[in-house]
Image (tube, helix red, strand yellow):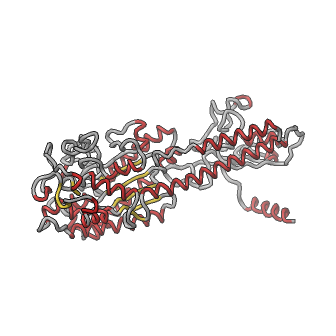
């Protein structure tokens, strides 16, 4: 190999290594999308006609920005998870997220929302699970516009974390509110859980169809132990209502089974279950181990257990908020949210998360991406090495090609026009593509001039470039054919965003005749 050729090859290798070596681990994922109810709402209900609002003091009394719409004195569980994932800022609510902000994720959660459409209607406006999914679909359209095309958007969204927490209101503000809802008369707890999981599953599949691949499904906590339920149903103000908690356990068991079902069904996605119910059991059973002194009353509220009426505007809350499990009649304090969020991210017990925690779901995906990146690096390095060898060995121009034919398979790096007449966005048959090609003609090559396989064809001694399959005819076939197709991949669905339908690609060679030719070639090679 001549000195100049070797030097060019070394530079190319250094460029490739440099591109893959520059890894930025902060944040751990590019975006975090949040779906849920008042446990994670951070302002989506502020400007709607609803009683389910928290945009006034003393809500947010310990939050840096004051009252934002969070139903706590400070951070929620998803705020804690966002911090642990490495985000510098908290994920913005859907009603405020604009422009580039959406690329870090969006919080769609709405207080009083549930899986069922009617859940929480006695409190006024709210956005149900299906409504939040529709809002997410709007965001996806914006992400496509920001990133340029659907393929890039799909790749980007597949790396994000999605957390989903629904079900609490379907019991608290539906099933166990018989004066407003008929669901408890229509269904047994088992039947109601089945109905909820069926609707839940439909919405999860919609998220999957719009790019979600790493989903965290959060179970329902012990609603029967909230100050509101203790105030209404507990004879001593301490004993939890097991009728409600039993129904919650049934739902959680169905949700955990759904995680298994989804993981088996979607091999390219990961689903995990967060066991919030047992985490709360730990806090209630051993409060002093976690720094809590009061676990049956709200820090801010009115009436028995501070749970008959929730925290009122400008009401003076308890001063020792870190010692309270509950902030108001229904919602945990920041101190409790820190524990639940931290254990969701990194499990401290084998029962905290199934089959693994949020940190692990990120690490597994990162390992896959790192492996793919290393494979791609060596693929390109090997290709550059082959190019360098051909350049070194083929310094002279031969009258006849060194080989009789050259067959090419690949994607847009080698496509010479196979996609031109297909119904696909992966095309390059228009200026300025080909601006430096022979006669300044755009042929379908995804570059300003020649591709790497064009250069190889020249060095092999071909007097013309290898024609694309879509135009190759007659004796031209004897020189070889280029079958490459922009957006094509190893997997059939590669290049598609929403549906597992193959996008337009170049036809493939096949059939009985081709098979017989292949058999003869193999027999000849064995002789």
Residue 228 lies left or right of residue 28; in this view the side is left
Residue 31 lies left or right of residue 486; in this view the side is left
Classify the position of the C terminus by image quarter. bottom right
Q: Position of residue 388 (x, y in %)?
A: 77, 42
Q: Is residue 490 above or below residue 432?
A: below
The foreground one among 377 and 453 is: 377
What count of labels does the image hold? 0
Q: Position of residue 58 (x, y in %)?
A: 18, 44
Looking at the image, the residue that sits furthest to the left is 303
Q: Is residue 223 above or below residue 482?
A: below
Looking at the image, the residue that sits furthest to the right is 399
Q: Quadrant of residue 11?
A: top right
Q: Position of residue 304 (x, y in %)?
A: 10, 59
Classify the position of the N terminus by image quarter. top right
Residue 144 lies left or right of residue 172; in this view the side is right
Q: Residue at x 71, y 60 (%)?
A: 511
The foreground one among 258 and 214 is: 214
Q: Position of residue 328 (x, y in %)?
A: 19, 53
The foreground one among 157 and 197 is: 157
Q: Residue at x 71, y 57 (%)?
A: 510
Residue 357 lies left or right of residue 298; in this view the side is right
């Amino acid at each position: 190999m001549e000195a100049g050729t070797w030097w060019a090859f070394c530079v190319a290798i250094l460029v490739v290594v440099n591109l893959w070596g520059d890894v930025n681990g902060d944040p751990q994922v590019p975006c975090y999308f949040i779906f849920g109810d008042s446990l994670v709402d951070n302002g989506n209900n502020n400007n709607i006609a609803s009683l389910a609002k928290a945009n006034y003091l003393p809500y947010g009394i310990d939050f840096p920005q004051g009252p934002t719409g969070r139903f706590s004195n400070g951070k929620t569980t998803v705020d804690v998870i966002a911090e642990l994932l490495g985000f510098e800022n908290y994920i913005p609510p859907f009603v405020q997220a604009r422009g580039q902000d959406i690329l870090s994720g969006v919080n769609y959660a709405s207080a009083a929302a549930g899986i069922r459409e009617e859940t929480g209607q006695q409190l006024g406006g709210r956005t149900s699970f299906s409504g939040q999914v529709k809002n997410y679909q709007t965001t996806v359209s914006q992400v496509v516009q920001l990133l340029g095309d659907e393929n890039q958007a799909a790749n980007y969204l597949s790396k994000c974390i999605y957390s989903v927490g629904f079900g609490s209101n379907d019991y608290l503000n539906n099933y166990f509110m018989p004066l407003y809802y008929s669901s408890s008369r229509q269904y047994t707890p088992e039947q109601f859980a089945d109905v909820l999981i069926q609707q839940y599953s439909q919405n999860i599949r919609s998220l999957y169809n719009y790019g979600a691949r790493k989903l965290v499904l959060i179970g329902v906590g012990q609603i029967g132990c909230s100050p509101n339920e203790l105030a209404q149903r507990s004879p001593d103000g301490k004993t939890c209502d097991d009728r409600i908690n039993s129904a919650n356990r049934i739902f959680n068991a169905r949700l955990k089974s759904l995680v298994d079902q989804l993981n088996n069904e979607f091999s390219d996605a990961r689903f995990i279950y967060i066991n919030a119910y047992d985490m709360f059991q730990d806090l209630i059973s051993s409060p002093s181990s976690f720094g809590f002194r009061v676990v049956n009353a709200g820090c801010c509220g009115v009436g028995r257990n501070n749970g008959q009426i929730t925290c009122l505007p400008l009401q003076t809350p308890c001063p020792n908020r870190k010692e309270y499990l509950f902030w108001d009649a229904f919602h945990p304090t920041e101190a409790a949210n820190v524990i639940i969020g931290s254990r969701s991210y990194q499990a401290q017990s084998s029962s905290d998360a199934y089959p693994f925690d949020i940190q692990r779901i990120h690490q597994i995906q990162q390992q896959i991406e790192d492996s793919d990146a290393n494979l791609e690096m060596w693929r390109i390095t090997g290709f550059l090495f082959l190019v360098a060898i051909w350049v070194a060995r083929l310094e002279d121009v031969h009258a006849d090609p060194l080989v009789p034919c050259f067959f090419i398979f690949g994607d847009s790096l080698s496509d010479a026009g196979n996609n031109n007449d297909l119904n696909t966005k992966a095309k390059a048959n228009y200026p300025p593509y080909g601006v430096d090609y022979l006669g300044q003609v755009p042929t379908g090559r995804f570059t300003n001039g020649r591709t790497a396989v064009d250069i190889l064809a020249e060095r092999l001694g071909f007097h013309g470039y290898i024609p694309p399959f879509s135009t190759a005819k007659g004796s031209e076939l004897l020189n070889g054919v280029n079958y490459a197709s922009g957006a094509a991949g190893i997997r059939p669905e590669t290049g598609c965003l929403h549906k597992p339908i193959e996008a337009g690609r170049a036809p493939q060679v096949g059939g009985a005749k081709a098979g017989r030719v292949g058999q003869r070639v193999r027999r000849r090679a064995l002789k």
